[in-house]
Image: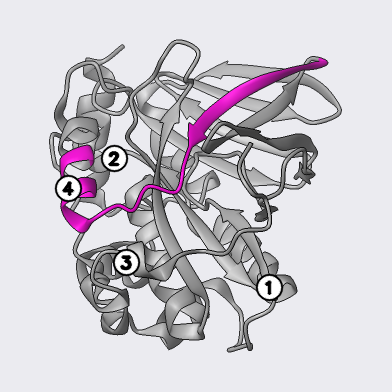
Amino acid sequence: MPDTAKTVNTTTRPGGTEVWHSDDLDLDAYLDRLGLPHTAPSAAALSDLHAAHVHAIPFENIDPLLGRSPSLALGDIADKLVRRRRGGYCYEHNLLFAAALEQLGYDVHRQAARVQPDHPGPNTHMNLRVRVDGADFLADVGFGASVMRPMPLTDGSERDQAGWPHRLIAEGAGWRLDKLTDGMWETQYSFDATAQYPIDYEVFNHYVATHPRSPFTGRLVVMRLSEGICRKIIGGDLVVEHADGPDEHRTIEPDQLGETLRSLDLDLSPAELDLVRERYAGTE
């Protein structure tokens, strides 16, 4: 059983913060995108930053759907998610969030996770361990529409995530994130504290953005989470999940795609929308 009170060992973090070029981020522009002021590091401020990021920036796979590998250079991520007000997937979200946290004075450790380890899924997801106020937290603004606020990294800790309970379980040298679904705990992913290098995420990103078996290359995926409601485009369907009621399903016709994307806070340019609509129709 791991020591649930252990601190982050920053000496294992490859190259320290400078290797991640965190200072390249325009922090003011990022905070403006979130609608938040500068605040000193604290567990409460971390929670507010995490929730504001999830509310403001969509999860989406438009670039991989169109055959493009998203750039993981911090400047490119910021241009896409902050200036152009697009969304992205886990690497883009969590690399951006990690850089902002480091500029604000948080101790951040970048990690990898295995999605659906019972199957098992690939060990390609990115999440973060953040140390503040003498405690470690799991932070993950890039896991689709799942984690609204950071979770204390202690065995058995539970947190309501916008209406869906989640828990962390210590397993050997690592951890497991579970979600309560229909009265049963379902494992979302497993992870440990192994240090990751930028090149690791480049390799993961290449697989996730290009492999034909990746869930992000063959169908449109857009996800938005708010209190009590989760809205998703999965392939050709709009799924609306309610924390306290039945799900709704609706097929999206190609001519409804632009309006549906805008309802999920993705307002694409006409050229981008035409490309997505063409690819979308081709997957029906």
Judged by depth in the image, the label closer to the viewer, 4 or 1, is 1
Residue 150 lies, in percent from the top left, at: 65, 55
Determine whether the residue tagged by mark 1 lies in a helix, strand or loop: loop
Q: Are marks 3 and 4 in contact (CB under 8 Å)?
A: no
Determine whether the residue tagged by mark 4 lies in a helix, strand or loop: helix
Does residue 134 show up? Answer: yes
Inter-mark Cα distance, 1 to 2 = 39 Å
Asked if residue 196 lies in the magenta stretch, the reply is yes
Identified by mark 4, the residue type is Glu
Residue beneath the point at 15% across and 52% down: 199
Circle nearer the N terminus (3, 2): 2
Q: Which residue is mark 1?
A: 134
Residue beneath the point at 42% across and 18% down: 236
In the rendered view, tell whether residue 239 sits above or below residue 7: above
Residue 257 lies, in percent from the top left, at: 40, 33
Asked if residue 16 lies in the magenta stretch, the reply is no
Inter-mark Cα distance, 4 to 1 = 32 Å
- What is the quadrant of the N terminus in the image? top right
Return the residue nearer the eye: 165 or 252: 165
Task: Using the rendered view, name the quadrant where residue 275 is placed.
Answer: top left
103 displayed left or right of 3: left
Inter-mark Cα distance, 3 to 4 = 22 Å
Range shown magenta: 183-204
Judged by depth in the image, the label closer to the viewer, 3 or 1, is 1
Task: Using the rendered view, name the quadrant where residue 282 is placed.
Answer: top left
Circle nearer the N terminus (3, 4): 3
Q: Which residue is mark 4?
A: 202
Task: Using the rendered view, name the quadrant where residue 89 is placed.
Answer: top left
